[in-house]
């Protein structure tokens, strides 16, 4: 918290904090994966996450006194101090900490907190049943989706809650034009005739790091063509496969949309291949992609 390592129970903010009242914060979600064979925790694509955090800060007129390398070092150190030998989830948050009444971004103090805690699956990775939400995805000219703004996740909460109350596992959100945007907190991919389709950055999506990972793996490992374009709602009903992805969700195949089966209603072969590739990579089992994995316990890495 602002450069000091503290027990979580001492990480207090005031009830008058600007970010608490107005949602003026940005955050990241970072996963670390435990590899029992190597006795190592690998933090996945740390550099990309912290680069995106600092980009989010720019959009909210924030300035943190830390470089990307310093933020990476703090993530590694926090896992060590917690003596975590398990899958973990880290949440860095930059926020406006002034205790004032008044909605603005300029002229305020920017503070920072990083936490690290155990986490398993965020959503099922064995096949999701999704519903198209009545809630539209926020627009770039309202709250920029390319920034992970704390207050903007009320939009996701509306969609997720509606989906759960309607008996689905997850929501699929449309943008203001009625085109497919993303899940409540995941990017989306459709597979049709052996090609992969995903909404373009212009469709009010978060520029997901897992999304970019899936694109690279689809092209480089599976030899598939990837199209980034507008997607109509009815394409969800004719897709051969659909998957959601994100740091929290990982790679989660979709087997049903609006009570319509996707393909044959089972996890499809391309989704399964991507999921298997991803699992091996994040746990440090694929030497080709070890540069995406930051080992926490340096002495173990050195022994290897």
Image: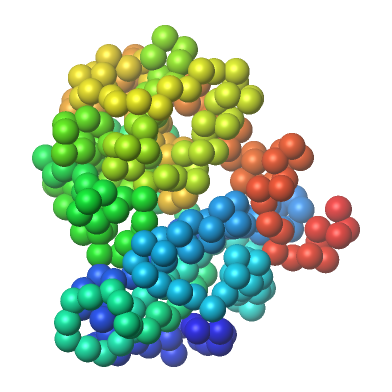
Write the residue at 33% across / 83% down.
108
Q: Is residue 20 visible?
A: no
Write the residue at 70% across / 41% down.
289
Q: Is residue 266 above or below residue 170?
A: above
Report x, y in % for residue 73. Answer: 66, 70
Depth order, front residue of 279/198: 198
Q: Is residue 252 above or below residue 197?
A: below
Report x, y in % for residue 85. Answer: 64, 64
Indicate left or right for 51 with 198 as reference: right
Q: Is residue 168 above or below residue 21?
A: above
Write the residue at 49% across / 75% down.
64
Depth order, front residue of 234/41: 234
Report x, y in % for residue 46. Answer: 59, 57
Q: Is residue 245 visible?
A: yes
Depth order, front residue of 229/262: 229
Q: Is residue 103 above or below residue 244?
A: below
Indicate left or right for 115 with 76 as reference: left
């Amino acid at each position: 918290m602002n450069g000091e390592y503290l027990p979580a129970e001492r990480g207090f903010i005031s009830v008058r904090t600007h970010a608490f009242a107005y949602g003026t914060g940005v955050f990241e979600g970072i996963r670390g994966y435990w590899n029992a064979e190597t006795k190592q925790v690998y933090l996945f694509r740390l550099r990309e996450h912290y680069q995106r955090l600092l980009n989010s800060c720019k959009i909210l007129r924030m300035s943190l006194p830390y470089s990307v390398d310093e933020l990476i070092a703090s993530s590694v150190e926090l896992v060590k101090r917690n003596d975590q030998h398990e899958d973990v989830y880290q949440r860095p948050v930059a926020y406006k900490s002034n205790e004032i009444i008044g909605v603005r971004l300029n002229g305020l103090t920017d503070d920072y907190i990083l936490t690290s805690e155990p986490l398993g699956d965020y959503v099922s990775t064995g096949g999701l049943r999704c519903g198209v939400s009545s809630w539209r995805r926020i627009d770039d000219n309202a709250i920029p989706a390319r920034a992970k703004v704390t207050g903007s996740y009320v939009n996701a909460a509306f969609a997720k809650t509606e989906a759960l109350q309607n008996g689905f596992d997850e929501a699929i959100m449309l943008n203001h034009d009625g085109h497919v945007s993303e899940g409540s907190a995941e990017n989306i991919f459709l597979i049709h005739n052996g090609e992969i389709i995903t909404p373009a950055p212009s469709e009010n999506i978060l520029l997901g790091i897992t999304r970019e990972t899936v694109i690279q793996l689809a092209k480089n490992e599976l030899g598939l063509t990837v199209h980034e374009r507008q997607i109509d709602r009815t394409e969800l009903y004719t897709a051969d496969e659909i998957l959601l992805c994100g740091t929290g969700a990982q790679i989660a195949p979709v087997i049903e949309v609006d009570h319509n089966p996707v393909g044959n209603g089972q996890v499809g072969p391309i989704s399964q291949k991507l999921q298997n590739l991803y699992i091996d990579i994040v746990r440090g089992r694929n030497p080709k992609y070890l540069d995406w994995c930051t080992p926490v316990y340096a002495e173990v890495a050195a022994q290897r």
